[in-house]
Image (cartoon, rainbow, N blue to C red):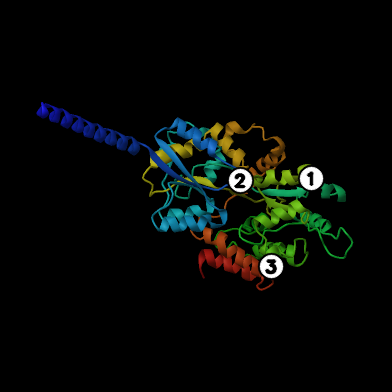
Amino acid sequence: MKKTAALFLLGIIVSTLLFAGGKQEASGKKEAEVQSVNFWFHLDDPEARVDSLIQKFEQENPGIKIEAERVPWDAYHQRLLTAVTAGSPPDVSQVKLWWQPQLVELKALEPLDKWISTWQGRNDIYDRVWELTRYTDGKQYLMPLQMVILYMYYRTDMFKELGLSIPETREEFLDVAKKLTRDTNGDGNVDVYGFGIRGARGGHDWWGAFVLSSGANFEKGGLTTPEAIAANQWFIDLYRVHKVSPPTTPNDGFKEIIANMQSGRTATTIHHIGSAKGMVDALGDKISAFPVPEGTEGRWTSFGDEENAIFSASKVKEAAWKWISFLATKENNLTWQKASGQISVNKSNAEADYGELSRFVKATTESADFAGVLPAHPATAEFVESVWPTTMQRAFLGEITSKEMMEIFEKHFYGE
């Protein structure tokens, strides 16, 4: 009897252990089937969220979990480079176009062509977007996410007050900027400036709108021609000679140029639709936009940016592709734009209702034909992040001439 009871008890124990082991094995198998995709992203609006998109994706793809990490913009590029160098980049990250050459040279990005070739949504992406994001080796490393095209913001109330028309050329713009620069309270000090220039990091787009449209280009020798040096001098003179931008210009960054517009300290500036909602919240119908003025050789404005890339070190590339193609699909892409404040990359969203932001969408789309990108050169990222701002500040402060400034740029890209 005791022997039978003992054998029965032993049987229960063994069965329990086998069940537990089987359950643990099954659980482990289940956990192994769930792939985590580490996704780095940035949104200009600190209140914007993309949680609903992540939830929708995970419901449609139960074997994939998106680990999203919002990265501060000022630290984004350096943090990404550090992660790549350390061999621990995210699986997916938003990537600026001018970072692409540097990352390709580091062999950090995974070509996407094999997936794109069979992706049903590929023909719904604007051809121009594919063209501008394709790398010089013919491969597609970036998956379109949003269109970021810069235009000119302007205070409609100030233009109306002074009877000013929207300027079409850079000389018309200079005339308008001079008239907008004034002492409005009679205390003898200028309190409104015609043009808010971003002299710090990121301001190369302000510079490019006037200099790259007036004879300068990034081909070898194209930055130091007499025409290029003269175009650069014209831009420097906006601050040093005509004084149509605030005294703080050499150090003004994104926060400053936006705050100056909203407070009425400046009457125009350059940025993209990502800041439109904040502008409208602050100014209502007192703010609008138009394409950047024409230079001596046509128009140029910055196209970008912040597309998605899969990193070659990723162990979950198939899952990562599902995520970035999900974000590039019509309905999901439009949802992303509502958070980012940018323009959809999908042709089928061309007639989407952007409500009170429609006038900024119009300025964006009207600028698409002359939107360009900086050269696909490994030196471009450093040019944007440090060489341009430090050199521009020196020129604004009168420490170097226009010729010396452009020679520094030429040397950075092409050596002696």
Report the Cα–Cα distance between label 3 and label 1.
Answer: 30 Å
Q: Where is residue 327 in the image (x, y as percent from the top left)?
A: 51, 37
Mark 3 or mark 1: which comes first in sequence? 1
* Tag 3 secondary structure: helix
Report which quarter residue 178 is drawn in. Answer: bottom right
Q: How crowded is mark 2: few (under 14 residues within 10 Å), some or many (20 or more)?
A: many
Q: Which of 52 and 155 is in front in this view?
A: 52
Residue 88 screen position, x and y as percent = 40, 53
Q: Residue 396 carries which label?
A: 3
In the image, taking residue 15 as reference, residue 266 lies left or right, namely right
Instruction: Select label 3 or label 1 by which is in front.
Output: 1
Q: Which of marks 1 and 2 is in front?
A: 1
Q: Mark 2 = which residue?
A: 148
The amino acid type found where label 2 is placed reads Val
Q: How many numbered tags mark residues here? A: 3
In the image, residue 51 sits, relative to residue 229, either above or below, namely above
Q: Which of the two labelled residues, at mark 2 and mark 3, occupies the earlier sequence position?
A: 2
Regarding mark 1 in the picture, which secondary structure is present there? Answer: helix
Residue 217 makes an appearance in the image:
yes
Which labelled disc corresponds to residue 320?
none
Is 334 drawn above or below residue 134 in the view shown?
above
Q: How far apart are marks 1 and 2 (CA)?
A: 23 Å
Between residues 401 and 76, which one lies in front from this camera angle? 76
**Mark 1 highlights which residue?**
286
What residue is drawn where x is 79% and y is 45%?
286
Amino acid found under the numbered disc labelled 1: Lys
Q: Is residue 182 left or right of residue 319?
A: right
Q: Is residue 215 left or right of residue 287?
A: left
User: Alpha-carbon distance for marks 2 and 3?
Assistant: 27 Å
The answer to whether residue 402 shows anywhere in this view is no
